[in-house]
Amino acid sequence: MSTRNLTRREFIRLGGVAAAAASLAACAQPTPTPAPKAPAATKAPEPTKAPAPTAAPAATKAPEPTKAPAPTAAPAAKYKEAPMLAELVKAGKLPAVDQRLPVSPLVLKPHDKIGKYGGTWRTALKGGADNAWLVRTFAYDYLVRWDLNWTTVLPNVAESWTANADATEYTFKLRKGMKWSDGKPFTADDIVFWATDVVNNKELTPATGDWFAAGGKYGTAEKVDETTVKFKFSASNGMVIVRNACPDGQGPVQFQAEYCRGFHKKYADAAKLDALIKENKVDDWIKLFQTKCSGVPGTPIAARWQNVALPVISAHVLITPSATKDPCKAQRNPYYWKVDPDGNQLPYLDGIFYDYIEDMNVLALKAAAGEIEMMDRHIATNANKPVFVDNMKKGDYSFFETIPSSMNSMVISVNLTHKDKQLRAIFQDINFRAGLSHAINRKEMIDVLWVGQGEPYQCAPRPTSPFYNEKLAKQYTEYDVKKANEYLDKALPKKDANGVRLMPDGKPLAFTMEISNTGKEWMDAGPILQKYWKAVGVDMTPKVEDRALMYTRKDANEFDAMVWGGDGGLDVILEPRWYFPYSAESQYGILWQYWWRKDPRGEEPLAAPKKQMELYDQIQATGDTKKQEELMKQILQIAQEQFYAIGIVLPVNGYGIVKNNFKNVPKQMPGAWLYPNPGPSNPEQYYIEK
C-alpha cells in the first residue's frame, strides 16, 4: 500500500457511500478516477501520486509570490491575511503571515468563489454536551480528511502517507513549519507523545481498543524526523487511513507535547504537579491530565471543548468553554495552515457564536427568523420544514440537502447487560424484544411524528447499500397485537389483575426508557410507545433527560432502556454499532463492548456477539476489501438472528438552512457522523457576503 488516495470503489467495499452514488452525482466535485485495485497483502501496490484537493494548486506548492517591489522596499508578503490579524502584526503582537504559515500550506479551492474576510457565524449548541456540533463546524482537521463526496481520503495535516504491504506500518509526512494556535511548532514529537504517553499509558488509557490497536495491543509511534512519524502495529491494521478521516482521527492531533507534559506524571515536577492537583480540585494527576488535555471517561468533561488554554490546530479557537449555560464563542486561529488559491490565509470568518439552547422549539424559531447563518443539526426535522418553507423570504435563507447515512431515525435498546439479573434475562429473551416490536404501530408513528416521511425499518443497512439484508430490515415490523402477545407470552406468560406481565419473582414488570432531550420526535414518541406496550401488558415509563446525564448513566450501565439514532446505514463497516456490541454507542450491550476493548468494566459476551467480535477483528486485520465485505455479511447475518435492538423508521433525505448571504456552502452533502457534516465541506472557506 503506497502513498495515494483511497478510491470510491475501495470505500464502497468498506461500506461507505455506494448507496448514495447516484444522489451524490449532483455534488460540485467530480467523482475521482479510481486508482488500481490493491493486490493481496503480500505485495505492495505501485506508488501513486496523491492528487491536490479539489483542483486547487498542488498542496506542496504555495501560491505564486506577488510581483517583486522596488529594490528599496521590503519584500512583499507571499500570503495575505484578515484585516484583524494585519493590525496585530502592525502592532507587533503577531508575526507576519508568511512566518505563521507552513512551508507548504494546504491550498483549498473555495466551493463557489474566493471569499471575503469578516463576520460571525451564528449557530447553537443543544444543552451541555453537544460537542459533536463543535467537531462538525470547526474542528474537522485530522491527519487526513474526506473529500466532499465521501468517496476519497485526501491529505490534510499529513501531506502524504505510505504503508507497508501487510498494513503493519504507516508513515505520515507532516507539513514543515506548521504551528499550533499558540504559535509553537506542530511536529512528530506531538504525535509520539499522544501514542506513547497517552494511549500506551495504562493509567490514562486502561482499555485497549479503537483504530490504534491491532493484535490485542496498541500500536506505537516513532519519530523519523521533525516532520515524519511512523505508526507500527503488532498485527495487520487495514483501516488506519479511513479511521483517521473520521472523528476517530482527533487523537493524534490533540496533544501539544510541550503543554500537556506539564500535567503528566512522567514529565512534570512532582511539587508543581501536586500544586496543580490541589488548585484544580481533582483527585490525582490522572484526573488533572484528563481535565486539561483529554477527557474524563464516563463524564461530560472533554478538554478539547472546555479547556480554552489547550493549543489546537483548528480554523477557529474557543475563547469560552462549552458545556456551560452561557454561549460558546470561537475566534479565528492566526496560525491556521490553509490558504485559498489567491494566497489568502483561511478562515474567512472572524468567529463562530454558539448560543446555548435547551428548547428546540426556541432554536427552530430563531432559525426561521433568520438568526442562524447555517445549521441542520437538531432543527432539520420533518415537522419543522413547513415552518421553514413559510418563513424563507422573511428569514432570507434557503435549503441545502443532506444524504443520510443513518438507517433509522429512532432506535430503542433494552439493556441486555443489565445489572439486575432478572431484568437482564427478560431483556435477553428475543421473544420479549420481538413482542415489543410487533406492538408498535410504526405507520401511525411515522404519520404523527415524521409527517408521513419514511418507512417501517429495523436496524439494518439502507436499501441502496451493498450490504442490504431485507429480513434484517423488515423482521418484526408488522403492527400486530396478537403476534406481540404470542411472543410476550413465551417470555412472560403470567399477568396481574391490572394486566401487567409478571416477572419470575412474581412482581409486575416495570422499567424506565431514557430519552435524550436533543430529539423532539423521540421525546414525543415516549408516551406513544408507553401506550402501545401497556396494551400488551408491559409497563414502561419514558424519562426525558439531558444528553450528558444520559451518557453518564449509559457508560455506567445504570439504565433499563434507551433511545438513540441509527447510524451505520451506508458506512456499514466503519459504523457497526447496531449490528454487534462494537462501541459505547452500542447501548444494548455496554458491558460486552467493554470486554471486547479490554476495559476492566467489561463482562464476557454471549456466544453470538463474541463470534461477531472475532469476525470484526479479522476485518480490522486485513486490507483485502473483498474479505472485509464477506466478513461483514457474516456479522449482519448474526445480527439478523439476534435482533439486538428495535428500529422504527428509515430516514428520508435531510436538509439544512443557510442564509442567502452565507456563501460557499454546497447545495448537497452527505449527512453522517463518520462524515461529520458539514466538516468535509470545509467550513473554513465559508464567508458572509456583505
Image (tube, rainbow, N blue to C red):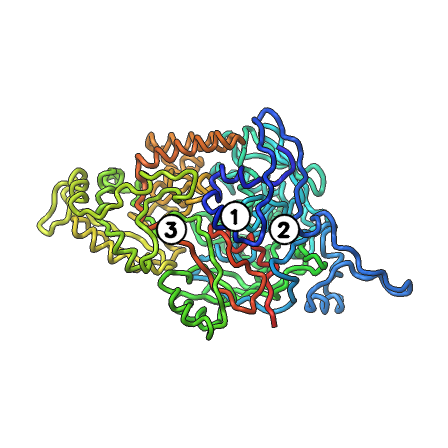
Q: Disc number at residue 565?
A: 3
Q: Viewer-proximal residue, 399 or 422?
A: 399
Type of amino acid under label 1: Pro
Q: Viewer-proximal residue, 279 or 139?
A: 139
Q: CA distance from mark 2 to mark 3?
A: 32 Å
Can you tell which of label 1 and label 3 is closer to the viewer?
Answer: 3
Reply above or below: 209 against 447.
above
- Residue 347 appears in the rendering: yes
Residue at 39% across, 39% down:
468
Q: Is residue 267 left or right of residue 290?
A: right
Residue furthest toward the right? 72
Q: CA distance from mark 1 to mark 2?
A: 21 Å
Reply above or below: 540 against 334.
above
Q: Disc number at residue 54?
A: 2
Q: CA distance from mark 1 to mark 3?
A: 17 Å
Q: Which residue is mark 1?
A: 247
Residue at 64% across, 47% down:
157
Report the number of numbered marks.
3
Residue at 51% across, 32% down:
625
Can you tell which of label 1 and label 2 is closer to the viewer?
Answer: 2
Quick one: label 2, few (<14), some, or many (20+) residues within 10 Å?
Answer: some
Can you tell which of label 2 and label 3 is closer to the viewer?
Answer: 2
Type of amino acid under label 2: Thr
Q: Disc number at residue 512?
A: none
